[in-house]
Structure formats: C-alpha cells, structure tokens
Image: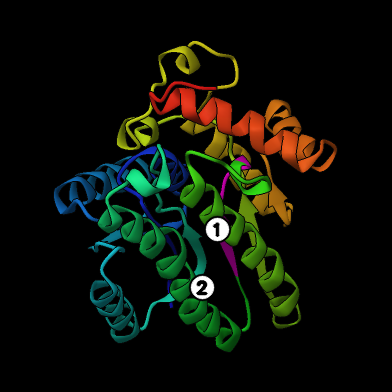
Amino acid sequence: MPRYALITGASSGIGLAIAEALARRGRNLILVARQRDALESIAYELTQRFGVEVLFSSCDLSEPLQVSGLLQELELADQQIDLLVNNAGFGTAGAFLQQEWSREQQLVEVNILALTRLCHALGQRMVQQGGGQILNVASVAAFQSGPWMSNYFASKAYVLSLSEGLREELKGFGVKVSVLCPGPTRSAFFRNAQMKSAKLERSSLMMSCEEVALLAVRGLDKNRAIITPGWRNKLMAGWPRLAPRALVRYLVGKVNRSSSGRKAD
C-alpha cells in the first residue's frame, strides 16, 4: 500500500513549501486546504516536477462538519498516512474584545480543534499500522503570552503543549511527534491578520517559507521534539524563560499593539 504525507494549509506559505520539500524527496502527498482550484494546480505541478502522486481535498477546517467529512473520506480511501503535518492556522491582531467573535471562534476551530481532531484520528491509525510521524506547526509565540494577539498566542501555546505531551504518550507505539515553532516568515500571515509588516519585511528576522520548510524536514529526520528554525528564533523562544513574566507581557504587548495599528503605551 502506498504511503502518504497529509499536509493541511497546503495551498500557500509554509504548508506549500513543506509539500514541495517532501515531494522533492519522493513522498506521495495528500494536500488539504480551502481553495480547490489552487490545490488542483499545485497537485499537477508537483506531480509533473517530482513524479510523485499528489492527492488533494478541499476542506474548511473551521467547519467541524467538513473536518468530519475529510476524516470519513480518508477512512473510506484506506490510505496509509505515515506523516501528518498540521500546518493550517491563522492569527488575529488587536484588542481581543474588539474582534468579531465569529473570527475568534474560527481561530480556535482551526488552530486548536481541527488540529487536535486530526492528531486523534490519524494518531490512532498510525498506532494501528505500527508507526508514523506527526508535525504540528506552532510558533515562537507559543513560549509567552501575547497581548493584542492574545487568542493567537494562546492557541500556539496549546499546540506546543499538546505536541510535547503526545510525544511522550505515543513514542512507545512507534509514533514520533514534533512541533515546529517558526518566527516571522514571509507569507500571507501578516496580511490576513491585518498587521503592519513593512518594517518587519526589511528585518533580518524574517525567514522565507522555503528556509523554514527545509529546516522542518531536517528536524523530522532527526526526530527533534521542538524544531525552531534559525538562531534568532531560538533566542526569541528562549528569552521568556529568563525574563520576569510581567516584563515579557509588557514588551510583547507593546510590539503587538504597534503592529496591529493601535498606539502603544
């Protein structure tokens, strides 16, 4: 039975870059995202370039019924998925109480609930088939609270904690779990979150999606528990453990408030 890597949020950004990096290695893929036309085009291109089989499924992960449909589709196809990349996610910026609740709910549905459900369903299948690998995409935001992006930062802290917990639970079954914690990356994230990113775009902190994907795949090869691409991002992930929490909250909040277009104190 052919084996596949399933990647969510695969139509752009880090998800697309990881798909290309895996296809380059000869991996068959199942791509999941909302945009069917984009997925169809990407699947054709990767198949032509790398000679791998690329399947795709259009699914809005913010809709629980569509997630159920995706899982049923995968079950009926009886495909052996030995790598799950939970990449889909997005952020919102600004004061939490000023956000539209529907958007904040969508964030929780995608960043937390859909990711957790896929880990549960496909993790069970991996245990039954004797092994597999899960890569959940968090962020350097996972290592501290983030005022003016509170829901997003909290969602990524959840992903980090869940991934580390599952790593211990599943290692005896041959299932390896890693979590990717990238820093600022050139993608549609900032535009979708309606954040100011012009200054950051010129910063050396910004990495390309291709760089992040390459380091993510190398981290998977080494079975790293936490994959933080780039030494600057490692510093960003580590400093909150050394500084007083009140200071961390203040400084991160000041940066987030400025980026969201709100005047910082």
Residue 136 circle label: 1
> Could you tell me the amino acid type at mark 1?
Asn
Res 31 visible: no
Residue drawn at (26%, 58%), measured in percent from left and top? 102
Figure check: 178 above or below 167: above
Q: Quadrant of residue 6?
A: bottom left
Q: Element at badge 2?
A: helix
Figure check: 47 above or below 66: above
Q: Quadrant of residue 154?
A: bottom right
Q: Position of residue 202 (x, y in %)?
A: 49, 10
Q: Is residue 193 left or right of residue 45?
A: right
Report the residue marked by disc 2.
119
Residue 96 circle label: none
Question: From the image, which quarter does the C terminus lie in?
Answer: top right
Residue drawn at (41%, 40%), measured in percent from left and top? 95
Query: In this view of the protein, which residue sits in the foreground, 33 or 117?
Result: 117
Q: Position of residue 146 (x, y in %)?
A: 57, 42
Residue most toward the left?
37
> Could you tell me the amino acid type at mark 2?
Cys
The secondary structure that dominates the magenta segment is strand
Q: Is residue 57 left or right of residue 12?
A: left
Residue drawn at (60%, 66%), measured in percent from left and top? 133
Q: Element at badge 1?
A: strand
Figure check: 163 above or below 198: below
Q: Is residue 225 left or right of residue 28?
A: right
Q: Position of residue 113 (x, y in %)?
A: 43, 69
Residue extent of the magenta highlight? 133-140
Question: Would residue 129 be counted in the magenta stretch?
Answer: no
Residue most toward the right?
242
